[in-house]
Amino acid sequence: MTTKPTPRIEKSDAEWRSELSPMQYRVLREKATERPFSGEYDHSFEPGTYVCAGCGQPLFTSDAKFDSGCGWPAFSTPAAPDSVAEERDASHGMIRTEVLCSRCSGHLGHVFDDGPGPTHLRYCINSAALKHQPK
Ligand code: FE
């Protein structure tokens, strides 16, 4: 299913650049993908909540995190159904479903239907788009 994000936080490019680290900016605002196995949360399973690195909205919880082996943090479900928005992404010669923060429209990653859990979903998310808040 494709849903249109409704931006509730809108900032100028200059504002985002000044607030985010270069890597956060590249991922969230330019839809870059961090190198696999390079992100700080790929193999971190500390209890807590992962919030958007751009706007602080809770996006995923540690309860839904699993080791997908693909090199990026993977989650079986968002923290809440409206935490994230989805859009069809036909870039790079693939049809994928892009996942965005529903509040600031920051790019998070993609969702695939090959997950191991009951949802069969694998939210493949860049560490740079997330901030972990310990429980
Ligand atoms: Fe956000």
Image (spheres, rainbow, N blue to C red):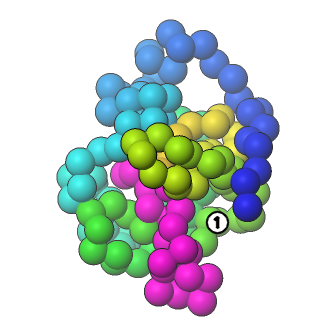
Q: Residue at x 51, y 20 (%)?
A: 16
Looking at the picture, tell me which residue is in the foreground, 78 or 46. Answer: 78
Residue for badge 1: 79
Q: Position of residue 68 (x, y in %)?
A: 35, 75
**Quarter holding residue 118:** bottom right
Q: Which corner quadrant of the figure contains ligand 1?
A: top right
The number of numbered badges drawn on the structure is 1
Can the viewer see residue 75?
Answer: no
Q: Position of residue 119 (x, y in %)?
A: 61, 82
Helix, strand or loop status at disc 1: loop
Can the viewer see residue 126?
Answer: yes
Residue span colored magenta:
110-135
Q: Residue at x 78, y 38 (%)?
A: 6
Amino acid type at image mark 1: Ala
Looking at the picture, tell me which residue is in the foreground, 93 or 61. Answer: 93
Q: Position of residue 37 (x, y in %)?
A: 21, 59
Left or right position of 21 against 57 = left
